[in-house]
Image (spheres, helix red, strand yellow):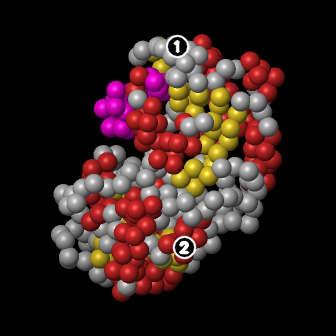
């Protein structure tokens, strides 16, 4: 193992995160900021340290890190992290992407009593039976495994909820405390409009942001935009390979790009550019088919931008409770109607988003994962 700096401080906090994609390293940044870089060590991989996300979110914070040995399994990753945290006399080992380590931790039951740091796992995916996600074996088994995990000594399990704290408990996961999705409040009054956006006021601009996987249902959004002549779609963020193939080969997507009614920014966006994009579009599309919170929803809320979400899941419950967006059937007609409805009453949604933006922040996330 190689370390940027090692410490045996009684107050040391270790954070295990090997995946730099999405919001994960932003979550780590909040923990580093809360503890101070001298009291927090990231246990990670060389690939994560060399990523654009690390350079953007963690290098400026002076984050200390340990690169774990290359491992063939998550169990080996966890074992390496536990050995390092124990040797350093760390107070806590925080695992933000805790879903990946439920089974590896259960397999360590016989030795956990000898592990010094308390382990805190954040469950980011708590899909329930009967929700919008397809029924899979893990959907039925995972709640039972999590309840077994909660009984282990020195292990505390929490679940990630929406940034506004609308959902406080999850069916099938009784007793898990909620942790609000951390969303820093926007401080920029007038962020510079990104050059990849259409001219201001020319058309209605719908934005799809973040890592764009198949779960974000871009094909459905493309078909809906094609039906609305005065709507421009902007897709900004890393495209998964299968999504990139779609936009390169689908006739409707190719036609929209040729007409300049679909703009692609297939790369990592730094926080300023990302926030400016969220501020500048008219609607943010969050047509996820997974039953989970969305950090993009909270970020859009802080910028007063309405959101479009699917009916039947977590995001619908949030927009119904807050009024920050519209929930629609996952059909072309439903998405078209939702975009039209938001634009007709846009200022009502904007005012709701501005009101609820005061409830978001990072304190709950940091206090729940680091506090007593």
Q: Tell which of 31 and 312 is nearer to you.
A: 31
Which residue position is annotated with label 2?
Answer: 321
Total count of labels: 2
Q: Position of residue 97 (x, y in %)?
A: 58, 40
> Which residue is painted at 79% across and 37% down in the image?
151
| Residue at 28%, 54% in the rendered image | 187
Q: Give the range drawn in magenta.
A: 39-65
Of residues 39 and 255, the one nearer the viewer is: 39
Q: Name the residue rendered at 34%, 31% in the picture.
A: 61
Which numbered disc covers residue 155? none
Hey, which quadrant is residue 197 in on the image?
A: bottom left
Verify CB contact (< 8 Å) between mark 2 and mark 1: no
Q: Where is residue 31 in the image (x, y as percent from the top left)?
A: 46, 36
Task: Give the Cα distance between marks 2 and 1.
Answer: 46 Å
Q: How crowded is mark 1: few (under 14 residues within 10 Å), some or many (20 or more)?
A: some
Q: Which mark is residue 8?
A: 1
Badge 2 element: helix
* Residue 73 in sight here: no
Question: Does 286 sit above or below residue 175?
Answer: below
Vertical placement of residue 155 versus 220, above or below: above
Decide: is 250 above or below 334: above
The quadrant where residue 316 appears: bottom right
Q: Is residue 283 left or right of residue 11?
A: left
Circle 2 Cα neighbour tier, 10 Å, few/some/many (<14 / 14–19 / ≥20): few
Instruction: Report if residue 43 lies within the magenta region.
Output: yes
Residue 277: percent from left, percent from top: 29, 60
Residue drawn 59% across the image and 28% down it: 92
Q: In this view, does 185 lie to the left or right of 95?
A: left
- Percent of width and height locating residue 244: 41, 54
Q: Is residue 23 magenta?
A: no
């Amino acid at each position: 193992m190689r370390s940027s700096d090692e410490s045996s401080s009684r107050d040391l906090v270790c954070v295990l995160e090997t995946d730099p994609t999405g919001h994960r390293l932003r979550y780590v940044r909040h923990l580093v900021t809360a503890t101070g870089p001298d009291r927090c060590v990231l246990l990670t991989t060389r690939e994560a340290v060399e990523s654009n996300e690390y350079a953007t979110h963690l290098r400026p914070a002076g984050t200390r890190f340990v690169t774990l040995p290359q491992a063939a399994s998550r169990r080996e990753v966890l074992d390496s992290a536990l050995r390092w945290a124990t040797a350093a006399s760390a107070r806590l080992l925080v695992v933000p992407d805790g879903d990946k380590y439920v089974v590896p931790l259960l397999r360590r039951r016989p030795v956990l009593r000898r592990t010094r740091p308390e382990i805190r796992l954040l469950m980011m995916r708590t899909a329930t039976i009967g929700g919008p996600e397809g029924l899979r074996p893990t959907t039925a088994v995972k709640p039972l495994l999590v309840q077994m995990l909660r009984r282990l000594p020195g292990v505390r399990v929490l679940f990630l909820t929406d940034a506004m704290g609308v959902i406080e408990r999850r069916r099938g996961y009784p007793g898990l405390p909620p942790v609000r999705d951390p969303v820093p409040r926007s401080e920029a009054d007038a962020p510079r409009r990104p050059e990849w956006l259409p001219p201001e006021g020319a058309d209605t601009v719908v934005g799809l942001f973040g890592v764009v996987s198949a779960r974000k249902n871009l094909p459905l959004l493309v078909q809906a935009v094609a039906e609305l002549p005065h709507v421009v779609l902007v897709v900004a963020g890393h495209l998964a390979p299968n999504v990139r193939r779609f936009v390169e080969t689908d006739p409707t997507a190719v036609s929209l790009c040729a007409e300049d009614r679909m703009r692609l920014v297939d790369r990592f966006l730094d926080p300023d550019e990302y926030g400016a994009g969220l501020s500048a579009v008219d609607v943010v599309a969050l047509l996820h088919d997974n039953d989970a919170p969305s950090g993009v929803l909270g970020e859009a809320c802080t910028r007063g931008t309405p959101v479009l979400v699917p009916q039947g899941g977590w995001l619908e419950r949030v927009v119904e409770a807050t009024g920050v967006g519209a929930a629609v059937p996952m059909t072309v007609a439903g998405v078209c109607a939702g975009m039209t409805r938001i634009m007709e009453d846009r200022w009502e949604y904007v005012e709701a988003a501005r009101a609820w933006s005061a409830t978001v922040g990072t304190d709950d996330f940091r206090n729940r994962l680091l506090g007593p």
